[in-house]
Image: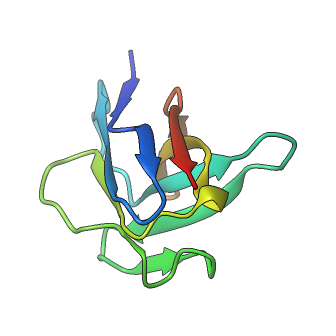
C-alpha cells in the first residue's frame, strides 16, 4: 500500500524559512514528476513547485527566487526549501508523487500546515 509522509510544516515569522519533506513508501516504480501544491482557506489548490526525474524544475511566479526543490537521489522523496516566507504563503502544503508513463499513477500526501505570521 502506498503511503506518503510529509513533515516540516509549522509556524514561522515572516522572513523565516522552513523545509518540507515528503517520503513515499510502497511505490515500486519510480515517479517522473514530484512536487508541492498548496491550498489556502477559500482558495483553490495551486502548484507551488515541481521537479521531473530529469531535474527540470518549475515554480509558481509567486515563489520564484524564494522556494527551491533540491535535487535528491533518494527515491520517491521530495523536499521544498522555503525561504523569505511571507504571510501569503500560509496554506496547507501537499506533496505529489506522480508517474505519467505507463503504468501511470498519482499519489498525494495528507498535507502539512504552514503558517507565516506577520
The colour scheme of the drawn protein is rainbow
Q: Position of residue 65 (x, y in %)?
A: 43, 84
Is residue 79 visible to the viewer in this orientation of the structure? yes
Instruction: Name the side, left or right, on which 61 lies relative to 4.
Output: right
Is residue 105 visible to the viewer in this orientation of the structure? no
- Outermost residue toward the top in this view: 1
- Most foreground residue, 34 or 94: 94
Q: Residue at x 61, y 57 (%)?
A: 87
Q: Quadrant of the N terminus?
A: top left
Q: Residue at x 37, y 80 (%)?
A: 56
- Outermost residue toward the left in this view: 73
- Most foreground residue, 115 or 57: 115
- Outermost residue toward the right in this view: 42
Q: Position of residue 16 (x, y in %)?
A: 37, 60
Q: Residue at x 82, y 50 (%)?
A: 44
Identify the image quadrant of residue 52.
Answer: bottom left
Q: In the picture shown, does residue 56 fall above or below 26?
A: below
Q: Position of residue 91 (x, y in %)?
A: 63, 45
Instruction: Name the side, left or right, on which 59 lies relative to 65.
Output: right
- Give the number of marks: 0
Q: Quadrant of the C terminus?
A: bottom right
Q: In the picture shown, does residue 73 fall above or below 26?
A: below
- Most foreground residue, 25 or 103: 25
Q: In the picture shown, does residue 59 fall above or below 47?
A: below
- Most foreground residue, 71 or 83: 83
Amino acid at each position: 500500500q502506498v503511503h506518503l509522509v510529509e513533515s516540516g510544516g509549522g509556524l514561522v515569522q515572516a522572513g523565516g524559512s522552513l523545509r518540507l519533506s515528503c517520503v513515499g513508501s510502497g511505490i515500486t516504480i519510480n515517479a517522473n514528476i514530484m512536487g508541492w501544491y498548496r491550498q489556502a482557506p477559500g482558495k483553490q489548490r495551486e502548484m507551488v513547485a515541481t521537479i521531473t526525474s530529469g531535474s527540470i524544475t518549475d515554480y509558481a511566479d509567486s515563489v520564484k527566487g524564494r522556494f527551491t526543490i533540491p535535487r535528491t537521489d533518494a527515491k520517491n522523496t521530495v523536499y521544498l526549501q522555503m525561504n523569505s516566507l511571507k504571510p501569503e504563503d500560509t496554506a496547507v502544503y501537499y506533496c505529489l508523487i506522480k508517474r505519467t508513463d505507463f503504468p501511470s499513477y498519482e499519489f498525494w500526501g495528507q498535507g502539512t500546515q504552514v503558517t507565516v505570521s506577520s
